[in-house]
């Protein structure tokens, strides 16, 4: 299962864990993805998307159509 937001394209990033002693070990920073059902009013159907929480907030604020146009 890929960890990519279907609307914004956010994907995992790579970085370092840095301890107090400045030891560095590699880590992945994974976006917070949620499965979300969204009702498309003009098509009269539900769609299921895997979205980051930031994309969910943007959809609630602006609507799904404005994000689909971008």
Image (tube, rainbow, N blue to C red):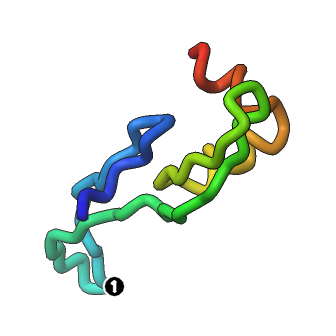
Q: Relative to 12, does residue 1 appear above or below in the rendering?
A: below
Which residue is identified by label 1? Answer: 20
Secondary structure beneath label 1: loop
Nearer-the-camera pick, 56 or 64: 64
Q: Quadrant of residue 65?
A: top right
Q: Relative to 43, does residue 59 appear above or below in the rendering?
A: below
Give the residue at x 72% y 37%: 44
The furthest residue to the right:
61
Q: Quadrant of residue 66?
A: top right
The furthest residue to the top:
69
Q: Relative to 40, does residue 49 appear above or below in the rendering?
A: below
Nearer-the-camera pick, 27 or 23: 27
Locate the N terminus and report the quarter of the image it occupies.
bottom left
Q: Residue 54: percent from the left, percent from the top?
A: 63, 49
Locate the C terminus and report the quarter of the image it occupies.
top right
Give the residue at x 33% y 85%: 20
Give the residue at x 81% y 44%: 60
Q: Is residue 41 left or right of residue 46?
A: right
| Mark 1 residue crowding within 10 angstroms, few (<14) / some (14–19) / many (20+) | few
Q: How many marks?
A: 1
Nearer-the-camera pick, 9 or 16: 9
Give the residue at x 81% y 30%: 62
Q: Residue 64: percent from the left, percent from the top?
A: 70, 32
The furthest residue to the front:
44
Q: Residue 37: percent from the left, percent from the top?
A: 63, 56
Q: Quadrant of residue 23?
A: bottom left
Q: Is residue 5 left or right of residue 40?
A: left
Q: Relative to 51, does residue 9 appear above or below in the rendering?
A: above
């Amino acid at each position: 299962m890929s960890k990519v937001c279907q609307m914004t394209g956010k994907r995992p990033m790579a970085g370092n864990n840095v301890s107090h002693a400045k030891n560095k070990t590699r880590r992945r920073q994974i976006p917070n993805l949620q499965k979300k059902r969204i009702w498309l009013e003009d098509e009269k159907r539900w769609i299921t998307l895997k979205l980051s929480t930031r994309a969910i907030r943007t959809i609630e604020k602006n609507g799904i159509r404005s994000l689909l146009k971008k």
